[in-house]
Image: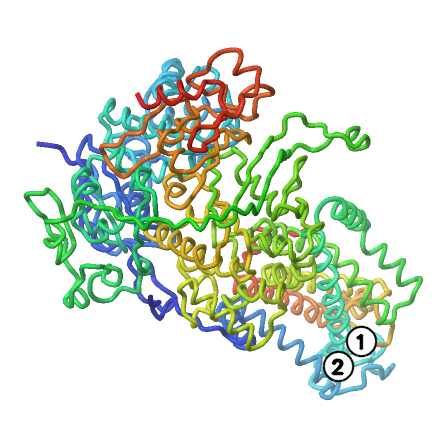
Amino acid sequence: MKLDNIYQEEKKSNFAKVAEIIITMASRPSGFIGLSILIFHVVLAFISPYIAPYDFKAINPTLMLQAPSAEYWFGTDDLGRDVFTRTILGGRTALTITFFGSLIALLWGGLLGIFCGLVGGKTDDIVMRIVDAFLSIPWILAMLLIVSLLGTSTEVLIPALGFFYGKGIVRVARAATHDVIAKDFIVSARARGHSNFSIIWNEIIPNVRDAILVEGAMRWSWMLLGFSSLSFLGFGVSPPTPDWGLMISNARGLMSFAYWSVIAPIVGLSSLIIGINLTADAFAKALGIDRSTKAPV
Amino acid sequence: MIEIIQKVKNLSIGFKSKKGEEILILRNITTNIKKGETVGIVGESGSGKSTLALAMMGYVKHGLYTIGGECEFNSSNLLKMKNRDLEKIRGRKIAMIPQNAGQALTPNLKIGYQIDEALQLHSDLKEEEREQKISELLNKVRLPSPETIALRYPHELSGGQQQRVAVAMALAGTPDLLLLDEPTTGLDVTTQAHVLELLNFIAKDTGTSMVYVSHDLGAIAQVSDRIIVMYSGEIVLEGPSRDILKKPIHPYTYGLLKSIPKLSLAGLPQSMPGSQPQPGTMHRGCSFFDRCNFSEEKCKNNSPQLEYLEELKTSIRCFNYKSLMNDSQVNQTVNKIKTSLQDKEILNLSEVSISYAKQKLLDQVLNRISDDNPTVKDININIKKGETIALVGESGSGKSTILKSIAGLLRTKGGIIKFDQDRNLSSDLKERDPNDLRIIQLIFQNPDESLNPNHTVEEIIAQPLKLYFGLKGEELKKNIIDLLQKVRLGEFYMSRYPRQLSGGEKQRVAVARAFAAKPDIILCDEVTSALDVSVQAAVLNLLQQLKEDFGTTYIFVSHDLAVVRAISDRVAVLYQGRLCEVGPSKDVYQFPSHPYTEVLLGAVLEPDPDIKPKLVAEDIVEEKPPQKGCSFQGRCSRILGDICKNEIPPWQITNSGNSIRCHIPLKELQKDQIN
């Protein structure tokens, strides 16, 4: 019995698999653009402290609200700080906090969702009602409460954001688990007497991993927007740390005569969000999951 | 001269692979459909038979495209027509009946409305006339009381009734050509026979030409005048139905007919080696070369052309058909199954009953059993070590339910499951210890679902070995290779994923996984029904071989009575979750003494135009077992009267050890059936 070449696939290493997915993503124009923007932002976040032309907190009253010039590419803000410096540095905190926040969201949301999908019954009912109850609380109010009680340090923001954005992932992971749970290979593993842990780890996770990862990537961009909203309201990072949300909030009153101080952070924030969204979509398509048919939870 | 209504000329359909290669699904198909004839298209999955049927109504599946050739209907090429013009033909001139009528009907519209819609689209009748026509159509497809059926929703009908509605809808436009894509595949044996009989009647009554696509030679044999055998996207044999089934001159058809289990033969048929090549993998030579018993050197490099034999009115694609022509009466030889039956009892079910109904709260509190009419009731079976016992019955007869409870996947309501005479097995997994779990293993119907798509074959087989025996490293690998060899797969399969295997290979991996646990009992749930006919025999032979080697006991669930006949030592017939008859398969099949067994066996379709199914009972489906009396009272043609309705029939035991549960005295039962 022989199989011909086009049906023959060798077992690939994990690295090769990831590389293949990235190549597939980049082969689509939208995926290529998304990936480029995302990579650009990530690289910038790493190198910006070394390439920033000015000190981000140096206040200079004589340079207030300068228009863009050869010296100050994006102009200066109301305290005379360089907008370019603050813009390239402004994504660092947001990216770091939301990246780790998304990881936490993925981890707890994904695992709880899979667990609920697997065990079903009363446990599932109770957990899901609690999740629903949390979904019904406006997240921004709850976040404000948490930060005002516990402060705005990174150690508070990451788990708090991770918690609030993980709720949606619970539902997605649970639904994805329901798709595979009825398949005979799960029944077969159960009948053999594997433990719940082993079933989750060996049988379910490999089959729902893709769906959850894509959902996590989408949550990342939403969380970024959420975090910036917090900063905008003054509950994210504290001044003088450069942050897009904070910068938009500070400069919004000056929009009519010093548009540069608000445009730059807006472009920074929206391009990053678009980049992550496009990447997530391309990622989903490369994995063969079409998000267009799924409604966001 | 007979009018030709559909001409297929040099049709090739294919798709582009990722690498840009053109891969052909259909290769140079040329055939004609004459007016009033029924043509059966038969082939394995992937042979292109459905693609051909769809092309006949001018439809090419998404992703595929026409590479060359044409489908001519009423002297216009359907494949080049605009959608608007096609709409005028589809439904009116050419109608299609889908495989799964339940899914083809809109669930939230009443049957009458849906037929009315079809009439509005495909006929010029006025509103008053349409109403008349609806009941006429429903009458024609023999649905009882058309007026009430028209007011029902699809889910309120049984599978057979839904299929009839689909036939009625197809007939709404009085088409010249009816395409049927596996129309009876999802139906029960008895229903299947009834629907086929209806189709035969309609073909004669309306003079409509039919194209009947199926993998089942048994069904094809009952309806078609002419048969087209497809293999790997080509027509390999085309000719009058009787000649093809009785004297197949193509090696593929010959082998296929030899590998189908028949009711009249006890024992396993010979299997055909290998599997059909995947589309795109054929380059040179005859596509059947690898599996052919009659192949020669020239078959390897030259592809045979379709040759028309005037004297037989048959077209054939083979170089060596002459060697088959002289001696091609299919003399089916079977490998008699050896029974390794021992006297030791290995599994005992006594008074087992299972219910799907949820317990009422009050009953839960009082800890009493609330459902007095459970889905499965009074199951008493002793299973001996080394025997193969088959549970047969229609869907809903509870055969899979019983299997699940034995496996510990479904709680029983009452009764005891005993292993090895002394060990009680709980019907709940959590209460079984690991060894109890090891001794019973399952093989499922569909290997696509029972193998994790993200695991390699190695990982799949390693699971039970690690779990039960804690094997690691070299020893684990050695055991896996050993198991793969036992199921006749090479070592190189270890790194493959299930999607890279054919259906038969996947099922072998599933078998290997079950045997990895060194079980005493293997539960086989319809293990061959998802497989192609040519592969089915090979898997059955493998199971039999393994059983002889290991002395395993099989509990075999199947709806296919011919398969059961081939492999089992004993048969238990179930109806509505109640046992009707238990006995050695030889006796059950020879003197089907219980009226229900008689119905079941009568409805089996054999690939022989001379054997017509006997339709004894109606094919209505009962949703719930009756509260009292015999479970089969609703459909029994030999019902005695009140006694059947009120009293549970007693077990009667024949001389040969066959137990029958019926009120009719044994002598009478057998006498009537012999006549």
Q: Are marks 2 and 1 in contact (CB under 8 Å)?
A: yes
Q: Position of residue B191 (x, y in %)?
A: 40, 29
Q: Position of residue B187 (x, y in %)?
A: 42, 35
Q: Chain of mark 2?
A: A
* Residue A242 image label: 1
Residue B284 found in image quarter: bottom left
Looking at the image, the residue that sits furthest to the top is B642
| Chain of the residue where label 1 is placed in the rendered structure | A
Q: Secondary structure at mark 1?
A: loop
Instruction: Residue under label 2, please give it.
Output: A85
Q: Amino acid at mark 2?
A: Thr
Q: State left or right for residue B430 relative to residue B329.
A: right
The reply to whether residue A40 is visible in this rendering is yes
Towards the viewer: B300 or B71 = B300
Q: Answer few, some or many: residues within 10 Å of disc 2's Cα (few below 14, many 20 plus, some between 14 and 19).
A: many
Can marks 2 and 1 be said to lie on one chain?
yes
Position in image of residue A91 (x %, y %): 73, 74
Q: Is residue A230 left or right of residue B269?
A: right
In this view, which residue lies farthest toward the left? B311
In this rendering, position of residue B525 left or right of residue B535: right
